Image (cartoon, coloured by chain):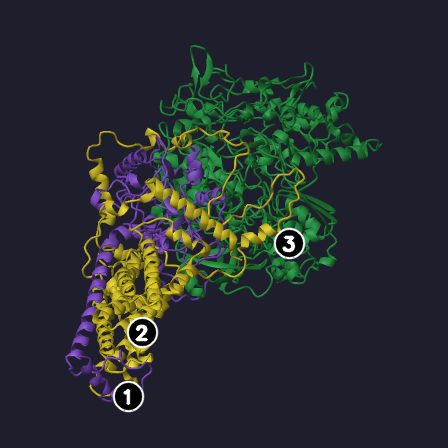
Amino acid sequence: MSHPSGPPPEDVIRSEHRPDDRRGRDTTPAVGRRGAPALWRRAVEGSPVALARRAWQDARWSYLYKDDTAYRARDGAADANAKVQAAARRMRGATEVPEGVEPAGPFINAPVWTWEVPAYFFLGGVATGSSFVALAADLAGDERSAAIARKVTMAAIGPGAPLLVLDLGRPARFLNMMRIFKPRSAMNAGAWCLAAFSTAGAGAVAADLLGRPRLAKVLGAKTALLGTYLGSYTGVLLASTAVPIWARSRLFLPPIFVCTAVATGAAANRLVLAATGVPPGHPTRNALGTIETAAMGAELALSSLNEQRLGQLADVLDHGRAGRLFRFAKWAVRAGLLLRLTRRRLGPWQHHVASLLYLSGGLAFRFAWIEAGRASAADHDAVARTARGKATADDRRTTARAKTSARRSPRDRRLPHLYADAIRRLSLAVESAVRRG
Amino acid sequence: MSAAPTEVAVRRPGARRMGFFTDTTVCIGCKACEVACKQWNDLPADGSVFRRRSSYDHTGALSASTWRHVRFVEQLEPAPLPDLPAYGGGDLDLVAAAERFGGVPQMDRWLFMSDVCKHCTNAGCLDACPTGALIRTEFETVIVQPDVCNGCGYCVPSCPFGVIDRDPYDGRAAKCTLCYDRLQDGLEPACAKSCPTDSIQFGPYDELVEVAKGRVLALHERGVTDAYLYGAGDEPGEQLAGELGAFFLLTAPPERFGLPAQAESPAQENGPLATAAGLAAAALGLAAAVASFARAHRAARSGGPLRAPASRAPLGAHPRAVRSRAPLRALRGRR
Amino acid sequence: MWIQGSSLVEAHPVGSRWALKARERGAKIIHVDPHYSRTSAISDLYVPIRAGSDIAFLGGLIRHIIETESYFREYVVNYTNAATIVNADYRGPEELEGVFSGFDPESGTYDRSSWMYEGGEVAAAAGQREHSTQAFSDRTGAGMMVGNVRSDPTLQDPRCIFQIMKRHYARYTPEMVERVCGVSKEQFLEVAETLIANSGRERTTMLSYAVGWTQHSCGVQMIRAGTIVQLLLGNIGRPGGGIMAMRGHASIQGSSDIPTLYEILPGYLPMPRGRDGDLTLHDYVEGGGSKRGWWSHFDNYAVSLLKAWFGDAATPENDFGFGWLPKITGNHSHYPTMLRALDGKLDGLLVMGQNPAVGGINSGLQRRALASLKWLVVRDLADLETAHFWKDSPEVRSGELRPEDVGTEVFLMPAASHVEKAGHFTNTQRLLQWRDKALDPPGDARSELHFVHHVAKRVMAHYADSEDPKDWPLRNLHWPYAEHGPEREPDAEEVLREINGYDLETGALVDGFAQLKADGTTSSGCWIYSGCFADGVNQTRRRDPGDLDAPGGYVSPEWGWAWPANRRILYNRASADPSGKPWSERKRYVWWDSEQERWTGYDVPDFPVGKRPDYVAPDDAEGMDAISGDDPFIMMADGRAWLYSPSGLLDGPLPTHYEPYESPVPNELYPKMGANPVAITWAHAANPITAPDDERFPHVASTFRLTEHHTAGPMSRNLPWLAELQPEMFFEIDPQLAAERGIEDGGWMTVTSARGEIEGRASVTSRVRPLKMGDRVVHQICMPWHWGTFASSAQGVTGDAANDLIAISGDPNVSIQESKAFRCDVRAGRRNRESTERQAGTQHAAGDHPPEEPRKLGQTDQADFRGER
């Protein structure tokens, strides 16, 4: 992540302070410390708090909580609940923001992620696509291509993890991602999946190098299966946030990301295979050509369909940086499709250029979606309307449904707890070993 | 309605859900809560910037270093311009003034609202947190464990109320803890303690909700028919994030205070559906890949328009060699 | 609750919880103010008014109450001087075009003999007097012979005060109020009707004001006008009524009880004057004391004070040392003193907990004055502008002052904060509350008590063997305080005991001022505080609210201690009707218990406990015997509340609307008269005042406070947590003016006055309204005054000081400056020179008046001002 340059101002003040108190009273100016609540210590450990009335009795006293100030629940008001609920419904029940009310933001915080995340999304996508290609090639009996695809997979996913670590506010604590297993958190699940995927993929490549084709195939298949999640969870990750443009695309974003993944994966492999001498007209190349084109076509179709139903929310998709990136991506893809589908032969480079266009298009899409998220979070009207529930064409009123299934927590089981704690300590140890400057 | 017992990470016999009831009708906008919070939690100032169109609010919004924040809402009503030139003010072009400002709207109401983490029953940040740094305490409040958080930043866009944030210097996410340390000692949180008009009330959740309901009715009787509870007392179908541990009494639509009219933990609302869609699409993609490979290779074998597989061709074979028929023959030869 | 000239919520956020509780219980809150503040936000009714036009508004209320006969007749007839007949030769401003009879244009003063009650005569002393020293006899009517004053209970006599008032305010119609104040007729009538509806037997209205009234060239009269309204409605001396003077900060009340003022001694005893008739204790008592009413005890208090000061050295033979007390010779208030300093006629200054370089009016002038001192001692919590003016100030930045040229030797002494020292606060309702010390002050910081104690000891040691008779007080000062701890800190409680007073024969603490004697057998440092240590217990330390739900439980007599005699409401005999029965059950407070033949009630009765309601004072009675059983206002010689004050005020017996010194509009009521004719200005080249016909400054400006900052700022601007809440100096202006001058919200703008020009952020908001006054529109600019140019902390904030813009001027009675209404102009963008450069070089200009002799703002003066431009 990006840090502001220089130390925080309050640290400057603290460092300038000269303790000059003869009485030994700490006169360091109280100007605050970041990231965590202060840790206060009792002068005498365990001693009671002077003048405090235990069990929150202080809070019980109030000059307002008196009958004479109409500040107590009306006992026996049977319709109290109904009235209160009706009042709330009047003010926030409507599916439109009331006339003349200008939403006064900020409503939500924009994502703080920097370039690392979309870059990882892209590479993760390529890896997923490659793993698919590897499996497909294996099944089609093209072992050599499969082996190459497996290598491409690893080449792509290799930098993925480091990128994610880089994006953390406390990179040294990256291990905490594996501290618990938490399916409801897309990022946690993704982290686990990434680990499994990389391990399987690495295993497969190793098997290839050691000349164990069967094992390689099996591991490759495993990789591809894990890939189904690795390629889609990034979409889920964005979709399960409060950012309107992402949240309202919850049914489209993951498929779109999968398409990009498959397409870029195929494109990457096509180029690599070509470079490694697979001749034109070779079925694998043709297949890859078909796949990347189909996938990109689908991606384009889904995107525009999504844009249609997003209505006004989609404004952020064609304005600002996000808009520029999207336009570039779309033109790249369209150009690729054109090159691919045109009858006329323009030369041997024609299809390679197409693949390159797909790749760059895919990359642009990833960055575009993150940018769009930032813009969308800052679009107060969008947030307000989304919350009101009439943001997109197919929106129903959003209601709060208790999802106990989603609220399963491992914390109340003993063993995982020990595990979690162990990782936490390890993480802290790592951090103290590699302090950020 | 309260959080699922399985989610509570810290156990303590007899602990109840505690919360805030912030009554904006008695708030005087003194910002004592904001300062008391920073003082008790020893949080830094956000830096002194004069913000435009912000009334008396110069700290802007809740952030990693501002856990209580007082919003100022200047609610205007249009009014006619004084119809005569200003005394001694030279000749004033009222038309221009009107065009520029749409007249001189009259001050209708000046609303103050002390915002804070809502400690949702269905907490988006808690659902999103991949490290388990965010937990639910025995008081059913949601707090960040600073020694666990690794600053992944996923909780930031996952909060439907824009509360939690990642400190740019420190790198960790931070937000209101409902003064967890004070609660453990049986003390009320700093902001509630410092509120001179009891606009911020703290106590056992159920009791607070009862008080709040009574307050709404009382205000209605007094003619303040706009008064309503934001985040408590709703029917299950209409709750905000399954009811808010810190709820508010407002007298204007939530949008005026930067609050969403409806909210739910995004992970719970969108996660399952998105995952399903994603996996389905991925499976489809994989299948499609396999299929097109199979088709291509089958076609190649059946000697259709497709030609030689490269598998037998020597690595780095020159394209010309490929165009010769030799490989094809070799292919037949293998049959 | 009626709040005018005060922003309760901004300046007293904690106290305002009670206002809100009152609102919760159904009370209406009315806020009349030029500036829409957080107070207005919680009010049921906000009324924007032109700064400085309050008397017109209040006069309108008085007229409305009289015309609609909505006054509380029984109360007015029996408890006020409404029925009293005034001298035949009294003439009011209606007849004399804006002045009262006895006006002398030359000296710009009044001969006030014609204002007297018929048959009454003013005490000899009151005629000739030092300028602006509020002669004590005047304030209380002490020394007046009121034996044969006539009165007409039917209020019909054309010369009775009621009829005089009726004529006086006849032209203060709602239409006139609209023309003068910019308050719409509808709003004015709504206020009037609400006040009337909430007053009378069953209900009372509370009035709260603050420096928004005080700081005007007729500030005292504004408060008087408010008092008249409250008296007409019968809201004085009754629960839920009264007038709350919201104070500027902690214990300001205390600093006038035991004064940091130059013209009174502890307990509001007058400062003895340096001329015949005041040089001996006897004359002093004669002049100050009174034959009738409470002040007949004057001598007890004066002698006990002298005994507290000089101990055994004070004997009847040497007049208890009275002769050695410093005598007052003129106006020694802050401004003349600083003007004297400006002209190099002051050696040194001791500044404790004050920041004149920012908070002082015309602060550019104040800073220049500081630069011409020889030495300056500043005690404060943080380094501040007043200690820093020589190093970094607008004058230094402009090059007018060069640090190497400034001869002032500055000593900055760290002060202990209120939690680091013991002592008591006296708050606005005269409640003394003791604070214990929470922790030791850091480093070399010490309490004021410590500082003063040790300075005094050094001074006394220095003069120990001086033969000079003038040093007698220093040699004989009674200074018994013990020292404690490593820092040799005196014990504040010991001082409070001395204030309470001792019976010197037994050495026991007295239980109240009733026990004080004039024969030198008792001592008391401040008679009104006598009793705060009754029974040898520190009464101010009590914190028992008692049973709040019991009848009258809200009085909480066991919480702290209120002077006088732990009385929570003054003149509370007025809460019962003349026969001694409560006006109403709902408002029962103090009443006559006929079984026990005594006054009783929830509070300590402010009346001789045994005096029957039907007691009628014989004409020749003296002392308290001269107060009849139905005369609640025992501090006044006639036992009545004064709607019309025959003596005491230098600028008229009745409040009259005058424009502020600097007003862009003429006086609608008295076209010949602009500002208060007897108000003070100190004509000085460095203190120019804008003439009425000056077109350069068309707008009205007023200052206000913010909750986030404290007064002149050193205590709040340097704390990051407070600084970020209000980071920059700003001006609130209405969108119309902003459009006219091209000023952008949040952008820079500059405000100029005759004194200087300052810059800040523009806050274009509809909270400020252009005021429609009859056929003209007046724009007001409201600005906080918390910013100065120096910050002692890296995260502290700085800004231009609003007081750089304001002229030094004075109300004739108390010489407070007019800082709540002055003229200015605005423009977009930043200032292009230092804030006070406008006057650089103009000071010490030839031909300016000797500053220590204040001048009236007569026509001649205005000519002079024009001459200067």
Between B75 and C232, the one lying in front of the other is B75
Placement of the N terminus of chain B among the 4 image quadrants: top left
Label 1, residues with CA under 10 Å away: few <14, some 14-19, many ≥20: few
| Pointer 1 chain | B
- Identify the hue of chain B: purple
Residue C414 in sight from this viewpoint:
yes
| Pointer 2 chain | A
Residue of label 2:
A268
- Identify the hue of chain A: yellow
Task: List x then y, in percent, for residue B223.
Answer: 27, 40
Q: Is residue C475 above or below residue C104?
A: above
Q: Amino acid at mark 2?
A: Ala
Q: Amino acid at mark 1?
A: Ala
Q: Do dots 3 and 2 share one subunit?
A: no
| Pointer 3 chain | C
Label 3, residues with CA under 10 Å away: few <14, some 14-19, many ≥20: many
Residue of label 3:
C365
- Identify the hue of chain C: green
Tell how many labels: 3
Q: Is residue A277 above or below residue C843?
A: below
The residue tagged with tag 3: helix, strand or loop?
helix
Residue of label 1:
B321
CB atoms of marks 1 and 3 within 8 Å: no
Task: List x then y, in percent, for residue C58.
Answer: 44, 42
